């Protein structure tokens, strides 16, 4: 559950994303379909008033809050060997320069990614696999 800069309450569930409608005490649903699971596992409102979502097995998305439409989507990229839509991105962060950072963790694994604004995609920074002691890193310029 997150509150955005406009005071709107957003709730991520196994059935998608919900926005609390204070005027009538109900919820407006996004990403809801009876025949599909859209497990919204993390919501992040950034400093530019965008709403970032992590949807299990789908990827990372930026939502246009007024229309409920997807503005941008970030899914698996063959240039980033450890980025897959099946990952559970459970931490988002925006630094003082406005960069968006993501992290994911699995069983004995951890990955850190940073968005490249010009290319509009995430670059993998570091990947740790504790079970086999693998450490991979990409040097950022």
Image: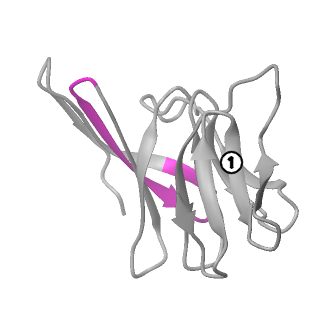
Q: Is residue 84 above or below residue 4?
A: above
Q: Quadrant of the C terminus?
A: bottom left
In terms of depth relative to the viewer, which is nearer, 60 or 21?
21
Identify the residue shown where x is 78% and y is 63%: 64
Q: Position of residue 22 (x, y in %)?
A: 74, 71
Label 1 sits on a secondary structure element that is: strand
Position of residue 28 relative to residue 36, above or below, is below
- The answer to whether one can see residue 75 in this image is yes
Characterize the local packing of mark 1: few (<14), some (14-19) or many (20 or more) Cα atoms within 10 angstroms.
many
Residue 68 location (% of width, % of height): 83, 57
Q: Is residue 76 above or below residue 102?
A: above
Is residue 119 among the parts visible in the rendering? no
Q: Is residue 39 magenta?
A: no
The image's colour scheme reads one colour
> Measured from the top left, where is residue 69 in percent x and y?
84, 54
On the picture, is 86 further left or further right than 131?
right
User: In percent of the image, x 60 and y 41: which residue is there?
Assistant: 13
Outermost residue, front direction?
Answer: 25
The front one of 75 and 49 is 49
Asked if the stretch drawn in magenta spans residue 114, the answer is yes
Q: Mark 1 sits on what residue?
A: 17
Q: Picture coordinates of residue 121 (x, y %)?
A: 59, 51
Camera-nearest residue between 79 and 18: 18
Q: Which residues are magenta?
A: 107-122
Dominant secondary structure (helix, strand or loop) of the stretch shown in magenta: strand
Query: 40 or 128, which lies in front?
Result: 40
């Amino acid at each position: 559950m997150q509150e955005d800069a406009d005071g709107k309450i957003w709730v991520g569930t196994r059935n998608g994303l919900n926005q609390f409608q204070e005027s009538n005490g109900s919820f407006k649903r996004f990403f809801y379909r009876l025949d599909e699971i859209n497990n919204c596992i993390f919501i992040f409102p950034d400093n530019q008033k965008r709403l970032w979502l992590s949807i299990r097995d789908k990827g990372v998305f930026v939502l246009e809050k007024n229309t409920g439409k997807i503005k941008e989507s970030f899914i698996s990229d063959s240039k980033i060997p450890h980025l897959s839509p099946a990952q559970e991105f459970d931490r988002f962060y925006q630094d003082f320069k406005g960069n968006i950072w993501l992290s994911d963790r699995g069983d004995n694994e951890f990955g850190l990614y940073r968005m490249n604004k010009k290319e509009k995609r995430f670059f993998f920074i570091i990947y740790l696999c504790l079970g086999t002691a693998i450490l991979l890193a990409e040097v950022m310029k």
